Amino acid sequence: MAGTKRDLYANAINFTFRVVPELKILTTFNYSQILSSSLPTSSIEASYTNGLLTVRVVYQQSIQNTSASLNVAPPTSLDNTFEMKASSASFVVDPDNA
C-alpha cells in the first residue's frame, strides 16, 4: 500500500497501491466487478494510472479500529489476465486517520 487518505467531507477513504510492473490491461477493468472489501461499504470505486491503483471506499458506519481487507479478483473474461493472481491487502483502520 502506497498510502491512504480520508475524505474529510464524506464517509470515504482513498487507498493507493503501487502496481509493479505497470500493467496497461488494468486501465480496461470495471473495478466494481473485481473489488470487494470486508468494510461496511456503500460503494467501491477505483482507477488505475501510471502504476497506481486508487481505490475509494465509501462506508456506512464508523470503521475506526476495524480489521479490514480489500480484495481484487482478476476477471476471467478478459484476454491477457491469465497470469494475474487474486490479491488482498489486510490492515487495521487507525482511529487517527479514518
Image (cartoon, grey):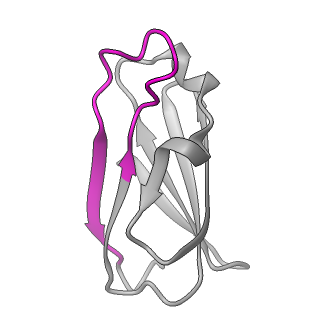
- Asked if residue 84 is positioned above or below residue 46 in the image, the reply reads above
- Asked if residue 89 is positioned above or below residue 23 in the image, the reply reads below
Residue 47 location (% of width, % of height): 62, 39
Q: Main secondary structure of the magenta part?
A: loop
Which of the 4 quarters of the picture holds residue 43? Answer: bottom right
Residue 30 location (% of width, % of height): 62, 36
Q: Residue at x 46, y 30 (%)?
A: 75
Is residue 39 rendered to the left or right of residue 56?
Answer: left
- Asked if residue 30 is positioned above or below residue 44 in the image, the reply reads above
Does the magenta portion include 84? yes
Residue 19 location (% of width, % of height): 39, 30
Name the one closer to the observer, 64 or 83: 83
- The number of numbered badges drawn on the structure is 0
Q: Residue at x 44, y 18 (%)?
A: 22
Name the one closer to the observer, 63 or 30: 30
Farthest residue to the front: give it. 77
Q: Residue at x 63, y 79 (%)?
A: 11
Residue 57 location (% of width, % of height): 56, 64
Which of the 4 quarters of the picture holds residue 33? Answer: top right
Q: Which residues are magenta?
A: 71-93
Farthest residue to the top: give it. 80
Q: Residue at x 59, y 30 (%)?
A: 29
